[in-house]
Image: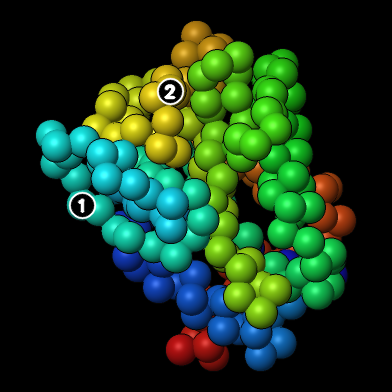
Amino acid sequence: MEFKLFDLGLTDFKPAWDFQKEIFNGVRINYIPAGLVICRHYPVITSGRLTKNGDILSDNRLPVYPIERGGSVTYHGPGQLTAYPIFNLNYFKKDIHWFLRQLERVILDFLADFGIQGLTYKGKTGVWIGQQKIASIGIAVRNWITFHGLSINIKQNDLDNFKLIRPCGMDIEMVSLESLLEENIDIESVKQNLVNKFENIFSIGRKINDQSTIAAIR
């Protein structure tokens, strides 16, 4: 199966959220076999279905979007690499837990390229470095089609806004790829690494940035 890759660059959350829905509709009507949206966001907080009172702290100054994905609250910023796989699990495996574990494998393999061994913990979705979290996962599934996805902390200078929330509803510390490697990382230079991992883990080919598909859906 092929997937179409859509690189939105640095964008506000709302347009990217709306774009996901357009691609979702394309997958639903079989106009697109599968889609992978790659982007970075201007600073924003999103709250999933499990967000509780107190997960967003009183001194928060960022826009907040309640969204339909699972999980609790998280921060997105320009120092993260975010991926939204919009896959029809009827063509893979109709098992949400399996899909979550595959997303964790994508992240683990991405980190391994930099000599970093990530960890996963039973009952805690995402990828960790010891007790610090480097990548978060939150998805929604309708009619066995997935949307929302994963984010990996790349830049060290984009971690402070996590202090405005209880990340994933927990009192945890977030870590970045830069802080682990103690060197500057250009996000554009590692983007292809992440796309390659999706190709490898899900065994699918890709077509890049098909703007005609976007126009047809709209």
Residue 10 x, y percent position in the rendering = 37, 51
Q: Residue at x 24, y 33 (%)?
A: 164
Residue 77 x, y percent position in the rendering = 35, 41
65 or 19: nearer the viewer: 65
First along the sequence among labels 2 and 1: 1
User: Would residue 35 be seen by someone viewing this image from the given angle?
Assistant: no
Image height of 83 relative to 134, above or below? below
Image height of 213 relative to 206, above or below? below
Image height of 155 relative to 191, above or below? above
- Would you say 173 lies left or right of 87 here? left
> Which corner quadrant holds the N terminus?
bottom right
Residue type, label 2: Ile
Q: Residue furthest top?
A: 182
Query: Could you classify mark 2 by the number of other residues whose Cα lies within 10 Å: few (under 14), some (14-19), or many (20 or more)?
Result: some
Q: CA distance from mark 2 to mark 1?
A: 22 Å
Residue 207 x, y percent position in the rendering = 71, 67
- Would you say 195 lies left or right of 21 here? right
Q: Residue at x 72, y 18 (%)?
A: 117
133 or 2: nearer the viewer: 133
Q: Residue at x 36, y 41 (%)?
A: 75
Q: Residue at x 74, y 77 (%)?
A: 33
| Number of marks | 2
Query: Could you classify mark 1 by the number of other residues whose Cα lies within 10 Å: few (under 14), some (14-19), or many (20 or more)?
Result: few
Residue type, label 1: Pro
Residue 107 x, y percent position in the rendering = 67, 36
Q: Which mark is residue 133?
A: none
Camera-side mark, 2 or 1: 2
Q: Are marks 2 and 1 in contact (CB under 8 Å)?
A: no
Location of mark 2 (residue): 172
Q: Which mark is residue 63?
A: 1
Q: Secondary structure under badge 2?
A: loop
Q: Secondary structure under badge 1?
A: loop
